[in-house]
Amino acid sequence: MRSRNAKRYSLLLAVAAMLAAITAPATANPLVPGGTFTDDDGNTHEGFIEAVAAEKITLGCNPPANTNYCPGQGVSREQMATFLVRALDLPATSTDYFTDDTGSVHEANINALRESGITAGCNPPANDNFCPNKTVTREQMAAFLVRAFGYTDTDPADRFTDDDTSIFEADIEALAEAGVTVGCNPPTNDLFCPRNPVLRSQMATFLGRALGLTPTTPPTVATANLARIYFMYDQPSGGPFLAPVARYLADPATPESAVDLMLAGPTTAESSQVPAFGSEVPGGTTRNGAIDVAAGVATVDLSEEFDDGGGSATMLARLGQLTYTLTAFATIDEVMLELDGVPVTVFSSEGIDISGGLDRAYFLDTGVVPEILVNTPAAWEYVSSPIVVTGVARVFEATVDWELLDNDGLVLTNGFATASIGGPFWGEFTFTPNFSVTAREVGTLVVWETSAADGSRTHLRETPVWLMP
């Protein structure tokens, strides 16, 4: 039984923005494990669902989060109108053609569809109704698409045996000739199932084929390439502080690809979520050449913009982002900085001494590392049970409390962990919470110190993660 926490820590407002960023260019952050929606994993139509989502033909079925696609639901006539208007970019109209769609969120698209001549209505000959809530059958879908895309049937072959009595038989044949449908009983495919409802998953494939889109199947967690990129993150207890973000790459993560992502800054989704990720790295900073890694030391050459502007806190933050991003790789313990090929021993006009190199310990007392820092998992990382949670803390009696929340803010599991050293010193902690979910969903890992004075939560750290079944 899941217990309810008094405060809902799940970052639900960020989910829609995070999913919108999933289809960013491959150089930034390609399709992540499981893809845009949580309820179509493994569906045979998932590739085309992703394709139409990338084109903004579908947004999802559970606004405002829109984490679900509802692949097994039938497509209503009003939804069909919106699909086609978005797919064909049909112009709007001020004419109100139908009397039964008032108040529908799809009304404008229904009227646009009528204006285009793709639909006439559902109650001939008057046709002043659209029947927006009725489910579209496969034969009706054929008629919609044939009108929308102008398909014709020039092949006299009768492809299907079960549509001979359908008034839409010609449309069905035209749709098949266009390659938009192959049938409903593979591998024979001599049936069309004309009176079956069109499912949302099937509709994605029909539209994807009609538009010539390429189906894109998301990688699995096992085949994804994870990089942990450090930015600055606000928390209820203050900040911004260093915190990692998970980025999934098309190719294995390298120090070069990780630094490039760090220099590029947070995605629009990451910077607009609540709390937001930010960066203290000046815009325009670039990497010069490959990063040399030898004996655990990474030498990275950046452009001179990296030294531009800011006070000591800003300068330490950008050095921290660089150092923590690189030392997330097991082969790197320390970072040496060059600017345009010149080794740096004193950084910026603030006179920050980095002659001995930069490691994670360098930043523990600089104000850029929070009293509790969770290094793994990173924000928006895909995690399976048990999660390996690691971090550093400077807390009373070396004790951190934690809980794992599901998408509804319910406590899946909780406990406490003991750091290797207690305050006023820094210590490392590790714990491995087990959990169980039936489908992929957003969860939140919450870690804090319990105040000895009043029992309140202090130094609170919240990390949104994807929980995998």
Image: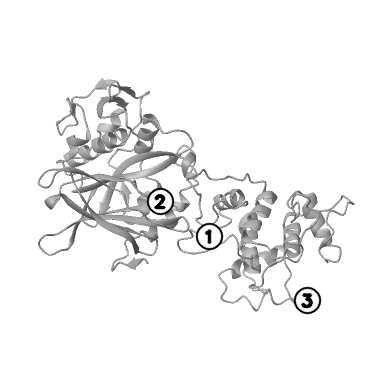
Check contact, mark 2 vs mark 3: CB within 8 A.
Answer: no
Q: In this view, does 6 lie to the left or right of 158?
A: left
Q: Which amino acid does label 3 sit on?
A: Pro
Which mark is first along the chain, 3 or 1?
1
Q: Mark 2 points at which residue?
A: 269
Give whichever of 117, 184 is nearer the camera. Answer: 184
Give whichever of 258, 127 is nearer the camera. Answer: 258
- Residue 383 in percent (x, y) is at 40, 48
Check contact, mark 2 vs mark 1: CB within 8 A.
Answer: no
Q: Which amino acid does label 1 sit on?
A: Gly
Q: Which residue is drawn at 74% across and 69% down?
A: 120
Q: Residue 19 carries which label?
A: none
Q: Quadrant of residue 254?
A: top left
Dot 1 falls on a residue whose secondary structure is loop
- Residue 35 in percent (x, y) is at 51, 49
Q: Which residue is drawn at 17% across and 39% down?
A: 312
Q: Mark 1 points at which residue?
A: 60
Q: What separation in Å lies between label 2 and label 3 (alpha carbons)?
A: 47 Å
